[in-house]
Amino acid sequence: MSPALNLAVIGTNWITNSFVQSAHESKRFTLTAVYSRKIDTASKFIDETPSIANASAVKTYDDLDALLADASVDVVYIASPNSLHYDHTLKALNAGKNVIVEKPFASNIRELNELFRVADAKDLWLLEAYRHIQEPNFLKLRDLLNDPAKKNEKFGPIYGASVNMAVYSSRYAKVLEGEEPNVLSLQFSGGSLWDMGCYPIMFTQALFGKPASQSYYPVIIRTGVDGGGHIVLQYDAKSSNQKDTFTVHAHTSKIYTSTAPTEIYCEKGTIRINGATGVTDINTVEFVPRGSKEAEQLADTNPEYTGLLNLTWEAKELGRIIVEKDRKTEASLRSLSRDVLEVMEDLRRQNGIVFAAER
């Protein structure tokens, strides 16, 4: 394997901690620098990240320009609030750094297109961190559905799907107390669609392609963002990868929890996907033939990596793309990211949800 990439992180929250641990487990990255607005916060992050073997070797910065001027940094991972993704990524690219951005890429498609333009002009790598589409059980399901012969023999035409990621957030309790946390604020490009709905939408589009049309029925909370809601994605023979016509119901929420599995309904039976949520940390993919109560296991129930939110698969693949200079896979992931953000922006605008970044 090639030498590990030197990694810097912007943001010191729980997802950054998980990514750093997973990046180390993947053997593709070594953390070399941490940025926070306060040095003490950066130091605390290092102390609380168990995969850092030598804390004294990791530099801390409270000046973003100084971190980006660090010649030893190969890749910057950005997990700041959603509204800051564009500015932080643009700065990193202009400083000549390759970038991995935590989902969602940006506040809107205009920002994303500009980031892609700058990355291409500077011949840099720019990738979005969606963990669940790199999980091996997801990839097995995708390969089954996208192989026409296997799909038709095993499942037949697709008739529809129900895709879920609805998890109550403690941040909503803060809203009920009169506060406005970043993740549920228009000021920081928050809301359930941008924070949670992107998962089932990405899951759906990575399997089936970009829908022919979409609609969203949200619950708008006191802060002006969507607390949760129901997404309808319509596919026809032209838009779906499988050349079938069907409807996907995607469920998202930060104000309550759903324990329903994700299911795909086919002529010959139902595919049932179970994980920590409806679309992540998938531990079983089962097929229940029509008229039967017995389920056939289609996935690996003992995956290579466990824990760490399964970010290791993500880190391993994104690191591989950069090290091996795999522009073909990067282009495919970029296209998927753009399609997902276009659908999400349309759903948001249908409901008059306007982020501060767009005012």
Image (cartoon, rainbow, N blue to C red):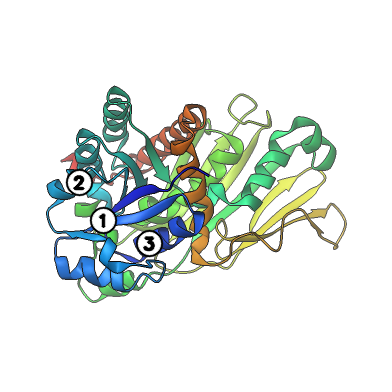
Left or right: residue 273 versus residue 327 is right
Which of the two labelled residues, at mark 3 and mark 2, occupies the earlier sequence position? 3
Which of the two labelled residues, at mark 2 and mark 1, occupies the earlier sequence position? 1
Left or right: residue 268 versus residue 72 is right
- The residues tagged by marks 3 and 2 sit, at their Cα atoms, a distance apart of 23 Å
* Contact check, label 2 and label 1, Cβ < 8 Å: yes
Query: On the image, which quarter does residue 209 sit in?
Result: top right
The residue to which callout 2 is attached is 70
Mark 3 vs mark 2, foreground winner is 2
Compared to residue 12, the image places residue 120 above or below, namely above
Marking on residue 15:
3
Circle 1 — which element? strand
**Mark 2: few/some/many CA within 10 Å (<14, 14-19, 20+):** some
* Contact check, label 3 and label 1, Cβ < 8 Å: no
Q: Which quadrant, please, contains the C terminus?
A: top left
Q: Position of residue 321 (x, y in %)?
A: 48, 37
Q: Position of residue 2 (x, y in %)?
A: 48, 42
Left or right: residue 355 versus residue 275 is left
Circle 2 — which element? loop
Q: Amino acid at mark 2?
A: Asp
The residue to which callout 1 is attached is 33
Q: Amino acid at mark 3?
A: Ile
